[in-house]
Image: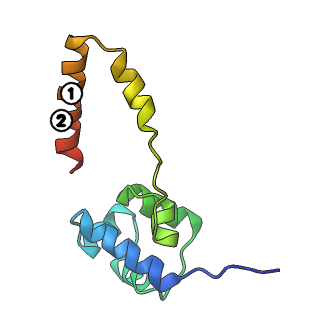
Amino acid sequence: MNEKVLDLPGIGIRIRTAREKIGLTREQFAEAVDLSALYIGQIERGQRTMSLNTFVRILECLHVDPNVIIYGEQEEQKLDKSVVQALLEKCNEREMKLAEEMLKLILTYVK
């Protein structure tokens, strides 16, 4: 049987990167996921594996897709622009202006 091996150092680096991205120190992160900072350090260096429960707590704290942590990638959701276009074509002028303002607001928060 061809079994895949997890890239523990890569997983650890991606966990550390995600933790730093949200501005948590190792100690703060450890407290948030109810683990010791030493254990978190070992995970981030790829020296320890973790249980599924621990992995889920880490994902919930970091608010990241499991694929990002495991594989280092996040599948891009392909947007069919024709769907958006079709919705906009059904709008009257007032609705179109409202949709434009809402899109501007959303984009200021996601960038």
Q: Nearer the viewer, residue 86 or 98?
A: 86
If the image is split into quadrants, where does the N terminus sit? bottom right
Across and down, in percent, residue 102 comes to 21, 28
- Secondary structure under the numbered disc 1 in the rendered image: helix
Q: Position of residue 108 (x, y in %)?
A: 16, 43
Q: Is residue 33 above or below residue 5?
A: above
Please name the residue shown 41% across and 87% down the image.
45
Give residue 91's position: percent from left, percent from top. Answer: 31, 14
The image quarter containing residue 51 is bottom right
- Tell me, yes or no, whether the two marked residues, 2 and 1, touch with CB atoms within 8 Å: yes
Query: Which residue was labeled with disc 2?
Result: 104
Residue at (50% x, 66% y) in the render? 54
Residue situated in front as seen by the camera: 79 or 108? 79
- Front residue of 7/25: it is 7
98, above or below 10, in the image = above
Extreme residue toward the right, this view: 1
The residue labelled by disc 1 is 100
**Viewed as shown, does residue 91 lie left or right of 80?**
left
As drawn, is 44 to the left or to the right of 94? Answer: right
